Image: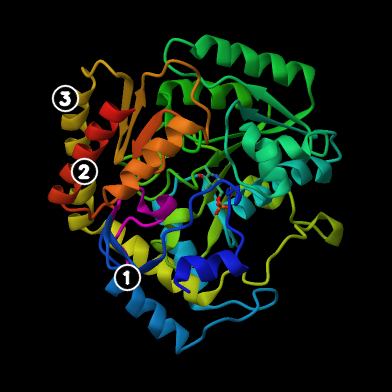
């Protein structure tokens, strides 16, 4: 039996209807922006393996840091104990985060980073003796698959089986260009008619919705409205963090600062599962008390895993190198050139670029569903042509590792152009 057949005997994959899905591609190794399957066929990883891998597969520098940490201290419980790798990650992050962020809380994936932020928003008001139990979120948001994160998510594929079992969430439209006012008005109205504790949002780019983008000024306005009403703000930077938008964080584009930030994905350069939620001093102080019941009773066994911390430290150092910053700028320029060319194509309705993120929408007769026929046709075409891209409905997006070579990137564009023809 080959790997794919053995897989089908024993594995259950995420986001997969096994009855109709094509068998998974068995990947044997990776280097830089490239992956090879078990038949040695080469693929360009044009989505950085679900947006986690900015510095390339099997990165030597991160691997060395991990190895060194593994052979020094691989794990120690974080309740009642601490260690230097965690302190170093926190110190380093506080240097690069918006300067109102003062406390770092570890967990192990994007959903838990969000889960922690939502629980802190709710408990903050509970600790104050105030009844604020509703969370505000965008339409078509994606914040993860655990229960509170899922409640905040607005894409029905992920949530429909669980309707009626969620914490209270109210939605507002995304302030895309020309529709900002409706979003501001909805936010004011929701705050007026609900006991809102917090507003969670993907800053500037909604990843899973298909790289839907909106302007920093609109986000500033929404955060201002929340501040006027004492509603906490949560920037879910799980996707946008660590350079994807061209700045270290999407929140670096705005004037306001959120109360909390959620980080994961590129945090460890795509090596070790780890996540962080960051907080203002005021939020931390809301739990600081002689009363043990006011503490945050949330934790995970692998919280602040030292090996993950070592990977995160090495990743942040890589991100800050001039070489990596130049890579980000180069990918961005190439995206702009490709945008200029492809936006005139009669089958392309819109294009969007921010940092290393590129997205285009293909004109379709009818509404293209999230995991529909067109999406599958495009996906299969990309795989056949040795490029890994996962379209969302009729939206094709590119979010490559920053170290992708110019030649590899041009090949991705060419395959995308060809795909538009067959769509
Ligand atoms: C991927 C993602 C999450 C969930 O992260 P997981 O590690 O998959 O749990 C949450 N928020 C955003 C914006 C994401 O892109």
Q: Which mark is residue 58?
A: 1
Q: Mark 3 points at which residue?
A: 341
Name the quadrant of the C terminus.
top left
Q: Distance between the residues labelled 1 and 2?
A: 21 Å
Does any atom of ligand 1 lie closer than 8 Å to the CB of label 1? Answer: no
Q: Name the residue under label 2.
A: 331
Taking the spot 36% from the left edge, 36% from the top edge, the residue there is: 397
Question: Mark 1 and 2 residues: CB-CB less than 8 Å, in contact?
Answer: no
- Is 70 drawn above or below residue 419 in the view shown? below
Task: First in sequence, mark 1 or 3: give its number.
Answer: 1
Taking the spot 62% from the left edge, 71% from the top edge, the residue there is: 302
Q: Position of residue 364 (x, y in %)?
A: 41, 19
Direction from residue 7 to residue 340 in the image, left or right: left
Taking the spot 57% from the left edge, 16% from the top edge, the residue there is: 183
Direction from residue 401 to residue 302 in the image, left or right: right
Task: First in sequence, mark 2 or 3: give its number.
Answer: 2
Q: What stretch is highlighted in magenta?
A: 44-57
Q: How far apart are marks 1 and 3 (CA)?
A: 33 Å
Task: In the displayed orientation, state which residue is furthest to the front.
Answer: 1
- Is 170 drawn above or below residue 152 in the view shown? above
Taking the spot 37% from the left edge, 24% from the top edge, the residue there is: 361
Q: Where is residue 229 in the image (x, y as percent from the top left)?
A: 68, 24
């Amino acid at each position: 039996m080959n790997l794919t057949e053995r897989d089908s005997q024993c594995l259950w994959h995420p986001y997969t209807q096994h009855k109709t899905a094509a068998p998974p591609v068995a990947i044997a190794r990776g280097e830089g922006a490239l992956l090879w399957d078990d038949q040695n066929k080469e693929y360009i990883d044009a989505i950085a393996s679900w947006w986690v891998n900015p510095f390339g597969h099997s990165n030597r520098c991160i691997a060395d840091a991990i190895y060194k940490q593994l052979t020094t201290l691989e794990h120690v419980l974080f309740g009642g104990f601490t260690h230097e790798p965690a302190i170093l990650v926190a110190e380093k992050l506080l240097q690069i985060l918006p300067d109102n962020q003062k406390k770092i809380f570890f967990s192990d994936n994007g959903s838990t980073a969000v889960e922690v932020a939502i629980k802190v928003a709710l408990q903050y008001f509970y600790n104050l003796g105030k009844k604020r139990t509703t969370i505000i979120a965008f339409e078509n948001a994606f914040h993860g698959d655990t229960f509170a994160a899922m409640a905040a998510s607005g894409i029905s594929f992920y949530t429909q089986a669980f309707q009626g079992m969620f914490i209270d969430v109210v939605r507002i439209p995304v302030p895309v260009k020309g529709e900002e006012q409706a979003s501001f008005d909805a936010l004011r109205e929701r705050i007026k008619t609900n006991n809102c504790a917090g507003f969670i949002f993907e800053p500037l780019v909604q990843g899973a919705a298909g790289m839907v983008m909106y302007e920093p000024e609109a986000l500033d306005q929404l955060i201002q409205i929340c501040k006027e009403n004492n509603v906490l703000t949560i920037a879910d930077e799980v996707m946008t963090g660590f350079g994807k938008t061209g700045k270290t964080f999407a929140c670096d584009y705005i004037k306001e600062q959120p109360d909390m930030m959620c980080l994961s994905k590129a945090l460890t350069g795509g090596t070790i599962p780890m996540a962080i939620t960051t907080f203002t001093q005021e939020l931390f102080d809301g739990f600081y008390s002689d009363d043990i019941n006011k503490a945050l009773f949330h934790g995970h066994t692998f919280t602040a895993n030292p090996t993950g911390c070592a990977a995160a430290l090495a990743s942040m150092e890589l991100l800050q190198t001039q070489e990596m910053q130049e890579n980000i700028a180069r990918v961005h320029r190439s995206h702009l050139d490709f945008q200029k060319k492809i936006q005139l194509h009669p089958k392309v309705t819109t294009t969007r670029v921010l940092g290393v993120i590129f997205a285009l929408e293909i004109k379709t007769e009818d509404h293209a569903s999230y995991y529909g026929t067109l999406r599958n046709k495009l996906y299969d075409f990309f795989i056949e042509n040795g490029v890994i891209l996962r379209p969302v409905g009729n939206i094709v997006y590119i979010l490559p590792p920053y170290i992708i070579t110019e030649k590899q990137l041009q090949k991705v564009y060419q395959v995308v152009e060809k795909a538009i023809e067959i769509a």
